[in-house]
Amino acid sequence: MKPLLECIPNFSEGRNPETIAALAQAIESVPGVALLHQDVSAGANRTVMTFAGQPEAVIEAAYRALKTAAQRIDMRRQAGVHPRIGATDVCPFVPLAGIEVSEAVALVDALAERVGKELHIPVFLYEENATQLHRKTLPQIRRGEYEGLAEKIKDPRWKPDYGPQTFNAATGATVLGVRKLLVAFNISLKGIGLEAVREMAVRLRETGASGRQLQEGEAPRGLLPAVRVIGWYQPDYDTAQLSMNLLDYHITPPLTAFLAAEALTREYGGEIIGSELIGLMPEACLLEAGRYFISGNKGEISGNKGEISGNKGGFSLQEAGIRQLKLDGQRPFLPDAQILEYRLREAGLLDSPFDGIEA
């Protein structure tokens, strides 16, 4: 399989359609790159874009997008409910096929140096590119957010890896790094207030109340290993949400996260009214949820894609997965648009049979 690198920049803009279009155009201006998905939230004032392609092309597209964001997004006038530290808050890279993590890390290091030197943006490296343990994760780097960055950057322990060692008020800072494939999954709740949903998030997330990175071998303090959760109010839906990052879907898939959230929601006297996927997820996540739903409805499944007999309602495996996770509770969920493998095939980035993402 030809080398394939994915990039998922998170921009601090979800309300200006001209700026969002300019960011997409910057990405698509590079040959060999396909823009797979855009997720725009006016309430969060945030846009997440997903693109993939040949590694060097993806790195160039990321640079052009970072440059466009720096030119068009002024953090001095930006406001939204989602945590952020800059115009391009975070720009992660995921090696999908045919490229070693070490190769991707080297490419991202070179990009970070270029961004710092040419765009004059302070750059922090995280995850596989991290240079220090106390600043390995995104929550560690983002703590204090944009509003606290001017003071934070003065601390020698928070000297940026690249770029100016002073606060850039217009752009803020950005975070770059190679990480595993992550599933961003938000669950909307009815009958739950903001204080309660924040308490629920603490009980669910791996780190529990400590909020610090767990050391190797340390047992999770919360209900869901390899999961980060914040509780917030989402104005797009006028509801409280559990906003989850599933850091390793092999350890905690969306189905496991949903069932844990469902049980906790009942305990607090509320109910789940829907969920949403931010960006893309592997097909395996949807099929697992579908099998669970069908088994509860006494159906029998044969084959990986799910030939189903006897299930009430006659759902396909995809439809069953959507129902189980309530992915269509607040807005339509279209597998062809939000399942990673399907989008890669449609974009012509897969030239051989593909049995699922293993990143």
Image: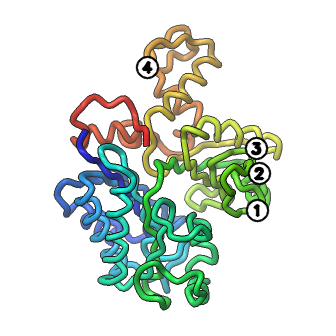
The residues tagged by marks 3 and 2 sit, at their Cα atoms, a distance apart of 19 Å
In the rendered image, residue 2, in percent from the top left (x then y), is placed at 23, 43
Q: Quadrant of the C terminus?
A: top left
Residue 273 in which image quadrant: top right
- Does the rendering let one see residue 265? yes
Q: Which residue is mark 1?
A: 210
Q: Check whether the beta carbons of the residues at disc 2 and disc 1 lie within 8 A of each other.
A: yes
Q: Residue at x 56, y 31 (%)?
A: 323
Q: Check whether the beta carbons of the residues at disc 3 and disc 2 lie within 8 A of each other.
A: no
Q: How is the image coloured?
A: rainbow
Q: Which residue is mark 4?
A: 304
In the rendered image, residue 293, in percent from the top left (x then y), is placed at 60, 24
Relative placement, left or right, of 45 versus 156 is left
**Neighbourhood count class around disc 3 (C-alpha, 10 Å): few under 14, some 14–19, many 20 upward:** many
Residue placed furthest toward the left: 31
Q: Which residue is mark 3?
A: 265
Q: Earlier in the sequence, mark 2 or mark 4?
A: 2
In the rendered image, residue 170, in percent from the top left (x then y), is placed at 44, 86
The residues tagged by marks 2 and 4 sit, at their Cα atoms, a distance apart of 35 Å
Q: Which residue is mark 2?
A: 221
Q: Earlier in the sequence, mark 2 or mark 1?
A: 1
Q: Earlier in the sequence, mark 4 or mark 1?
A: 1
Relative to residue 106, is residue 321 depicted above or below? above
Amino acid type indicated by mark 3: Thr
Could you tell me which secondary element the residue under label 2 belongs to? loop
The residues tagged by marks 3 and 1 sit, at their Cα atoms, a distance apart of 22 Å
